[in-house]
Amino acid sequence: MIDVIPVASPHLDEDDITAAVRVLRSGALVQGREVAAFEDEFSDLVDGRHCIAVNSGTTALWLPLLGLGIGPGDEVIIPAFTFAATAAAVRLTGATPVFADIDPVSFCLDPTAAADAVTSRTAAIIPVHLFGHPADLGALLTLARRHGIALIEDAAQAHAATLHARPVGTFGTAAAFSFYPTKNMQSVEGGMITTADPGLARTLRLLRNVGMETRYCHEIVGTNGRLNDVFAAIGRTQLRKLPARTAARRAHAAHLDAALAGVAGISPPTTCIGAGHVYHQYTIRVDDDRDAFAQALHEDRVGCSVHYPVPLHRSPAYRTAAHLPHTDTAAAQVLSLPVHPGLARGDLDRIVTAVLRHARREQLAA
């Protein structure tokens, strides 16, 4: 039986293992030199911004909200078409997530919909660079400045993505990256906050370390959001491989784009002008019966996944009466195909063959 082509492939190689073992043998395991070096090296990816390493992407979203004093009574505008961490970070502060619709081309927060959601209680906007495609930060920054509110980039899926040649993570008041194992780079688990504001950076460092800079001197109420040095060491080796792995993702996406262009019943992803997509996911739209299409690919041993089948405004923990037609349509149609760097040319050919076969089958049945 042929192997399944996985939709994602977390990859730890000998460099990562050697780095982890080196730190384990050193005995210096928490908030030490490896974390500081990781922060310094990641700063090069975001034009020299302050970098604060934390224990997860969720923490990386949550702490900037806390650091900006956002809490009960405040509203934060976010897309409902995203992973739940975006909304969870808002709710964990006591603030209220307000869902706005997405742009149907980029799958990212629509600036017009976000503008319509602004009220006197709005304290921040969190655009998500979904699937590795940058949100429309120009329009969203204009909106944020007009109303005097913060913009926090959710860049969890967008390491090394750019907008008009400027890296994501350098536009907003702060930005959050994730190093979960399936992300474009990983550290087993972890996250990074970036900001240009030195005062906010210091507050974030206090918040992640139970409120202290000097041991046992607790300046503010904080949490344990620290990244350990073993994970930081892995993050450093992964960061060095990010350019080559990003190039591989883009090459695989270009191959799929060319093969699937003009195929009836499916729509490959579109990259907006000026956007440097990094393809955390290669997400197509399937016009009819997406779930049956996905099942057919699985039977052909081609991995695929739906990100996300239940938008957050329809999820029990966050349900609202928001009317988000583009979000609902996307949730019913999207299907992510393998695009990760571990794919061989034969894998790509198998993916294309399976997609074309089932697309044609759908057309014959119609």
Image: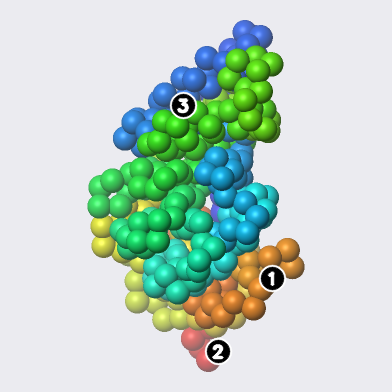
Label 3 and label 2: CA atoms lie apart by 54 Å
- Asked if residue 268 can be seen in this view, the reply is no
Image coordinates of residue 222 in percent, x first then y, are 66, 32
Mark 2 secondary-structure assignment: helix
Which label belongs to residue 365?
A: 2
Left or right of 221 on screen, residue 102: left
Left or right of 26 on screen, residue 111: left
- Asked if residue 43 can be seen in this view, the reply is yes
Marks 3 and 2, the one that precedes in the sequence: 3
Image coordinates of residue 3 in percent, x first then y, are 61, 51
Image coordinates of residue 244 in percent, x first then y, are 37, 37
318 and 291: which one is in front?
318
Marks 1 and 3, the one that precedes in the sequence: 3
Quarter location, residue 63: top right
At a point 65% along the width and 49% down the height, the residue shown is 93
Left or right of 272 on screen, residue 287: right
Image coordinates of residue 131 in percent, x first then y, are 47, 56
Left or right of 348 on screen, residue 300: right
Circle 2: residue type: Ala
- Residue found at the very far right of the displayed protein: 316
Q: Quadrant of the N terminus?
A: bottom right
Circle 3: residue type: Glu
- What colour scheme has been applied to the protein in the rendered image? rainbow
Label 1 and label 3: CA atoms lie apart by 37 Å
Marks 2 and 1, the one that precedes in the sequence: 1
At a point 64% along the width and 78% down the height, the residue shown is 321
Which label belongs to residue 319?
A: 1
Which label belongs to residue 39?
A: 3
In the image, is residue 36 above or below residue 337?
A: above
